[in-house]
Amino acid sequence: MPWKASSVRVSEVEESDLMTEPVDLFLVSSGYEERASYSASRLSQLVARRKVALAFTDRKHELCRLDNDRELSRLGFELIEASGASGAAAVNAIAAAAQESSEGGCRVLVDYSCMTRVWYAAIVTYLWQHVDKHLIVDFIYAPSEFSRPSPARPNKYVEALEGFSGLSSPERPTALVIGLGYESDRALGLVNYVEPAVTVAFLSDPALDERFVEATVEANRPLLRSLSEEHIVRYPLGSLRATAALLESCCLGLLKDHRIILAPLGPKPFGLLSMLLASTHIGIEVWRVSAGEKDNIKSRKALGKILCAEVEVIAGLG
């Protein structure tokens, strides 16, 4: 069943459902990870009126970047250079598709597997603030194969994402809800920085590969030991619907007495669900915590599965 929020409906759909009708725009990214072109290749038979690949302006020659450029060009994607720190190119592509689509509405497919949080945060913000027609966006994600975490690096960004800040009552105590990743001490460092009244950790368990669970627990062992069991929420990454329900239940309970900071440090689907939830509830901010361009890079391979969250925006309701 769809998850309803104001004039927006969010539901989980199967990969086969993506091929049932044409889309106005297929939007992907081209970067250094091998999986950047995976979904585009797997869905090569999808009929799209326009195909756009946002090509990172940095690291143009590292790892699989040039291979992805070539593969996406072969598949008919227009390469547009975009800074990872700005969501303008992503929003412009969707806005153009919406303007050029029929009066009946617009359908967009977004592969955010290798996008920065800034990019898909800008897309989510656009959906709530600027859409004036019926719009369906299928957010698809290709999970990666397991790889060992890189050595931890200092955080460069510890801040609210644009469009997800200034929504909270500062006089309320802070509840910090963290989607754990497997970078050592990143979550614990955030707790020490925020000094929240309440901390809740979301752990992907079961994961699509249990080695992710082991690595995440090991990286966050000091933090997990400091939390009571009721403040550790295990969610199934393979089920977006179940994860969305757990996250919404947790945050709505905390909102009664707290302002909430959602910090998705782990898998990107948790980050997307955090943004979708925060967009419909006053009192929830979404933060990014990263080392920026100093982050270690890896050529992650696709696991062979696609997760899809469908967002339907009905303008003029709510």
Image (spheres, rainbow, N blue to C red):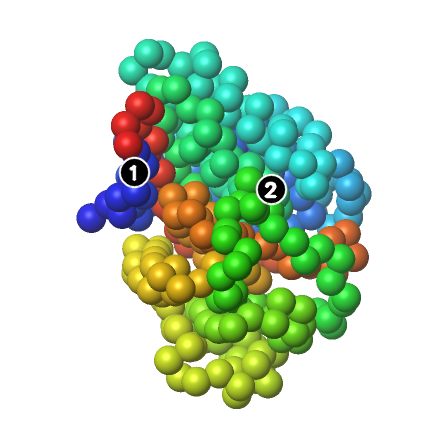
Which residue corresponds to mark 2? 162
Q: For the residue marked with disc 2, what is the amino acid?
A: Glu
Q: Nearer the viewer, residue 252 or 20?
A: 252
Label 2: which secondary element: loop
Q: Establish if 196 lies above or below 45.
A: below
Residue at 52 percent of width and 73 percent of height: 197
Cβ–Cβ below 8 Å for labels 1 and 2?
Answer: no
User: From mark 1 to mark 2, how far is it between C-alphas?
Assistant: 21 Å
Place residue 248 in its image quadrant.
bottom left
- Name the spot of residue 57 as percent of width and height, x first: 75, 36
Tell me if residue 297 can be seen: no
Question: Badge 2: few (under 14), some or many (20 or more) residues near its Cα, within 10 Å?
Answer: some
Place residue 74 in its image quadrant.
top right
Q: Establish if 27 lies above or below 253.
A: above
Nearer-N-terminus badge (1/2): 1
Q: Quadrant of the C terminus?
A: top left
Q: For the residue marked with disc 1, what is the amino acid?
A: Ser
Q: Which mark is residue 230?
A: none
Which residue corresponds to mark 1? 6
Tell me if residue 293 can be seen: yes
Residue at 56 percent of width and 46 percent of height: 166
Q: Nearer the viewer, residue 256 or 132?
A: 256
Label 1: which secondary element: loop
Question: Badge 1: few (under 14), some or many (20 or more) residues near its Cα, within 10 Å?
Answer: few
Residue at 44 percent of width and 19 percent of height: 98
